[in-house]
Image: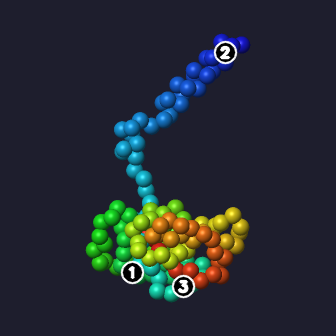
Amino acid sequence: MKTISLVTSCTFLCALLFAIPTHASIKNLALSGPEMVSSESSNKMNLVDAANYCRTLNSVCELRADGTPCNGDSFKGWRLPSADELGWFLGLSKSEDYLWTRTQYTELDKYIILSLVDGSWGWAGYAADVNVRCVK
């Protein structure tokens, strides 16, 4: 019985070793997220209006996720970001305003809001007035 559990344990450990990526493969791992974020809205709005704002936005990019400057081109096809997508831009903004995300909080009528200046977060009901930045 001990021999079988020892063999099973060794087999499991070997499988884990091959499943864990090496340092070289981690360096080449391509993480994907949004490429750019729009300027912050000039007005606060509820969640539905924020989603519509992003859907109809035709705007220049304000920040790129990789830190390179935007070249002034206007873009369509923006969307309301998830909390993870908005997190790609943490520390790249000086605005202390909270921003809408489409990520639901634990309660069905609440959504995560996030500040890009320091990563602080909270939640707001969908009818609350909050600023928005859209991602592409």
Q: Secondary structure at mark 1?
A: strand
Dot label at residue 59: 1
Rendered location of residue 95, percent (x, y): 44, 76
Q: Residue at x 70, y 73 (%)?
A: 109
Name the secondary structure under disc 3: loop
Q: Earlier in the sequence, mark 3 or mark 2?
A: 2
Examine the image and state in which quarter residue 39 appears: bottom left
Query: Which residue is labeled 2 in the image?
Result: 4
Q: Is residue 16 above or below residue 3?
A: below
Q: Are marks 3 and 2 in contact (CB under 8 Å)?
A: no
What percent of the width, then of the height, locates residue 42?
46, 86
Q: Can you say which quadrant of the picture contains the C terminus?
A: bottom left
At x 42% / y 53%, what residue is drawn? 31
Tell me the residue at 57%/22% (across/down): 11
Residue depicted at x 51% and y 87%: 43
Q: Quadrant of the N terminus?
A: top right
- Tell me the kind of residue under disc 1: Ser
The x, y position of residue 117, in whole percent, is 45, 70
Of residues 16 and 97, the one nearer the viewer is 97
- Residue occupied by mark 3: 44
